[in-house]
């Protein structure tokens, strides 16, 4: 089955400062290893970047750039988005179809927003999803710590059956 790797919102502004996502350096290292394996398997690697019209994560700003340490290769693809859903008003679905992708591997940030929304939309579009259990992250919130958000989504997303396709979690070291 042809697979593509979606790396969601691993952007500099989300990996630094007071709102820095949990364990972002370790997540970047895991994503780099997963991406290298996917490239070696000739699978598309797609970096998705969130942007706002002005201010924080404005297109082209330092904060909008891919995070320091993230390894981008010449054949990698990029998709810009303006909502938590990487499919909404983007060319992501057309890009996947043109490459005959049938399954997605998902990692990135923020777990409870863009990773969750894009994963659910992928299921609705018929794509089974492998969620890299230790390569998505969050800054947490007023109710849950970042590790709790991550664990919650690893458990919750794998229990969704109503779309047909399913989510399964795999740790980065176990992903072939």
Image: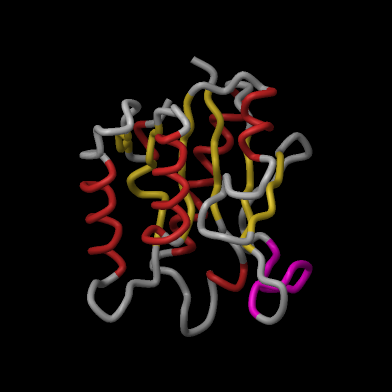
Residue 152 in percent (x, y) is at 23, 56
Number of numbered callouts drawn: 0
Q: Residue furthest top?
A: 1
Q: Nearer the viewer, residue 41 or 97?
A: 97
Residue 58 in percent (x, y) is at 71, 73
Query: Above or below — where is 67 with respect to 40?
Result: below
Instruction: Determine whether, in the image, residue 44 is placed left or right of residue 133.
Output: right
Q: Residue furthest bottom?
A: 18
| Residue 109 located within the stretch drawn in magenta | no
Magenta region: which residues? 56-65
Q: Nearer the viewer, residue 99 or 170?
A: 99
Residue 103 in percent (x, y) is at 47, 26
Residue 171 in percent (x, y) is at 33, 40
Q: What is the chief secondary structure element of the magenta stretch?
A: loop
Quarter occupied by residue 166 = top left
Quarter occupied by residue 112 = bottom left
Residue drawn at the location 62% of the way across and 68% of the way down:
12
- Colour scheme used in the picture? secondary structure
Residue drawn at the location 35% of the way across and 27% of the way down:
165
| Residue 61 located within the stretch drawn in magenta | yes
Instruction: Determine whether, in the image, residue 29 is placed left or right of residue 48.
Output: left
Residue drawn at the location 57% of the way across and 45% of the way down:
87
Instruction: Determine whether, in the image, residue 15 is placed left or right of residue 130.
Output: right
Residue drawn at the location 46% of the way across and 63% of the way down:
24
Quadrant in the picture for the C terminus: top left
Quarter occupied by residue 101 = top right
Query: Above or below — where is 146 with respect to 128?
Result: below
């Amino acid at each position: 089955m042809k697979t593509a790797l979606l790396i969601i919102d691993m952007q500099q502004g989300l990996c630094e400062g007071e709102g820095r996502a949990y364990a972002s350096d370790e997540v970047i290292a895991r994503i780099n290893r997963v991406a290298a394996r996917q490239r070696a398997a000739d699978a598309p690697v797609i970096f998705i970047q969130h942007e706002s019209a002005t201010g924080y994560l404005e297109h082209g700003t330092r904060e909008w750039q891919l995070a320091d340490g993230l390894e981008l290769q010449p054949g990698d693809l990029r998709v810009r988005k303006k909502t938590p859903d990487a499919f909404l008003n983007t060319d992501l679905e057309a890009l996947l179809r043109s490459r005959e992708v049938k399954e997605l591997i998902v990692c990135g940030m923020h777990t409870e927003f863009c990773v969750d929304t894009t994963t659910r939309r992928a299921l609705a579009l018929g794509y089974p999803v492998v969620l890299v259990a230790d390569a998505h992250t969050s800054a947490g919130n007023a109710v849950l710590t970042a590790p709790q958000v991550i664990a919650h989504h690893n458990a919750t997303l794998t229990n969704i059956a109503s779309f047909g396709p399913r989510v399964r979690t795999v740790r980065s070291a176990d992903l072939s």
